[in-house]
Image (tube, grey):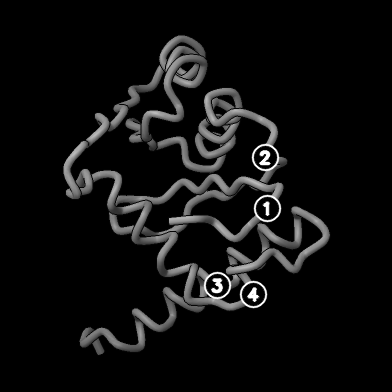
Amino acid sequence: MGKKIKGRKRHIVVDSLGNLLHVIIHAANVFDSIKGGIVAKEALERYEHLELFCADGGYQGTTVLYIIQELKKLIWISPKIKSPQVSPKRWIVERTFAWLGNFRRLVIDFEKSIHYAAEMIRIAMITIMLNKLDNSSCF
């Protein structure tokens, strides 16, 4: 599962349905465990009702300590799975990344600015949510 985005990392915060709450893009030379706390802090500033964060093993260490001690919230790190199965909580984020991968503009990073790249993710997610609403039978 090689990423075609070189030199940048994308961090997204999604709800339990996979809807985008927050996105941060930064240089790839910063570890996930360092940037994860900042991602969680910014998400909490926008959505105070968040009570639990779920993350993969890349966020262990600094992020876990920061979220527990500074933000006073809970975090669940998904265990490493050796079988081909995917953790149900982790699948939500992976599915959202797959949805975003359907947009050609996001497959390869054409944007020079990380701010424009983050906005392109938000625009793609708006399109995804509108398509879900259009396909739903609630009307």
Q: Which mark is residue 28?
A: 2
What residue would you read off at disc 1? 6
| Residue type, mark 1 in image | Lys
Tally the numbered discs. 4
Whether residue 100 is situated above or below residue 62 in the rendered picture: below
Q: Secondary structure at mark 2?
A: loop
Q: Residues within 10 Å of mark 4 (few under 14, many from 20)?
A: some
Q: Earlier in the sequence, mark 4 or mark 2?
A: 2
| Residue type, mark 2 in image | Ala
Q: Earlier in the sequence, mark 3 or mark 2?
A: 2
C-alpha span from label 3 to label 2: 22 Å
What residue would you read off at disc 4? 105
Q: Secondary structure at mark 3?
A: helix
C-alpha span from label 1 to label 3: 20 Å
Task: Return the x and y of residue 81 as percentages of the image width and height.
Answer: 22, 36
What residue would you read off at disc 3? 124
| 1 or 4: mark nearer the eye | 1
Q: Earlier in the sequence, mark 1 or mark 3?
A: 1
